[in-house]
Image (cartoon, rainbow, N blue to C red):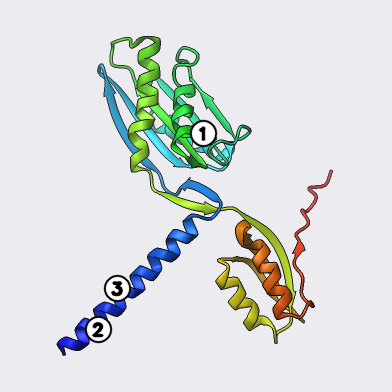
Amino acid sequence: MAELSRSSKEIKAQELKAKEVKDKEYTSAPGYLIATDEVLVETVVNRSRFLCYLFPCNSYHVMKARLTELQQAHPNANHHCYAFVSGAPQDSQAYGFSDDGEPSGTAGRPMLAMLQGSGVGEVAAIVVRYFGGVKLGTGGLQRAYGGAVKEALPALPTHHKVLTETRLLSVSYQQVSDIQHLIKSTNTQVLEEQYLENIKFVLAIPIDQLKLFKQQLLTLSSGTLRLEKRLEKSSGA
């Protein structure tokens, strides 16, 4: 019985080690960290309370909706300042910020600097301030708002987002088993699938696996299968 128990532990250890190796390889794929949940961390500076909310955000509209909720939740707060990065951490086109009545450059900009320096993308910060009666000055405000975000970032849950390209693939029912194996071996995500005369897949293929996917697809289908780019639908007039 003892021998069986030891063997089971060894098998379990090997499985965990294999999972760790796979996870390490997966997170080394091209991509970046993104926020996956909201956190709230409060800091106090000279009796002023700074409530920092960090949360997932992939567009200005997501940030604006949460801002409206927090304005309603904290109607007596003096300021509701924000900063967001809705794409990759260093995307120079996907960010925004607001001082919400604080002196220009003392709130939103230092908050944004903390977000961009964190290496986390698709994230927003809203800092709700309750004035404590002591003016902090320009430098003090910059340190307080930037510091509020800095204090909250270690508590933020994140996930590694792998960069992918979307492709279409149509296969016969006889080929589907091989294709499913290829999908799994390249960490490809199936976005959509339709079972008609043939099986049609919409795939999100990791960028670093795209070349391999094409090569193996060519080999296993003897050149009969090819990936197609997905055409974007027009929004119309």
Q: Residue at x 33, y 42 (%)?
A: 155
Q: Is residue 8 left or right of residue 199?
A: left
Q: Between residues 195 and 123, which one lies in front from this camera angle? A: 123
Q: Which mark is residue 7?
A: 2
Q: Are marks 1 and 2 in contact (CB under 8 Å)?
A: no
What is the spatial separation of the Cα atoms under label 3 and label 2, in whole angstroms? Answer: 10 Å
What is the spatial separation of the Cα atoms under label 1 and label 2, in whole angstroms? Answer: 51 Å
Q: Position of residue 141 (x, y in %)?
A: 38, 16
Q: Are marks 3 and 2 in contact (CB under 8 Å)?
A: no
Q: Are marks 1 and 3 in contact (CB under 8 Å)?
A: no
Q: Residue at x 44, y 20 (%)?
A: 107
Name the secondary structure under disc 1: strand
Q: In the picture, which quadrant includes the N terminus?
A: bottom left
Q: Amino acid at mark 1?
A: Phe
Q: Between residues 59 and 222, which one lies in front from this camera angle? A: 222
Label 1 neighbour load within 10 Å: few <14, some 14-19, many 20+: many
Residue 76 appears anywhere in the view: no
Tell me the residue that label 1 is attached to: 84
Q: In the picture, which quadrant includes the C terminus?
A: top right
Label 3 neighbour load within 10 Å: few <14, some 14-19, many 20+: few
Q: Amino acid at mark 3?
A: Ala
Residue 206 appears anywhere in the view: yes
Q: Which mark is residue 97?
A: none
Label 2 neighbour load within 10 Å: few <14, some 14-19, many 20+: few
- Residue 86, compared with residue 183, is above or below; it is above
Closer mark to the observer between disc 1 and disc 2: 2
Tell me the residue that label 3 is attached to: 13
Q: Residue at x 34, y 40 (%)?
A: 154
Q: Between residues 226 and 76, which one lies in front from this camera angle? A: 226
Question: In the rendered image, which quarter is residue 230 located in?
Answer: bottom right
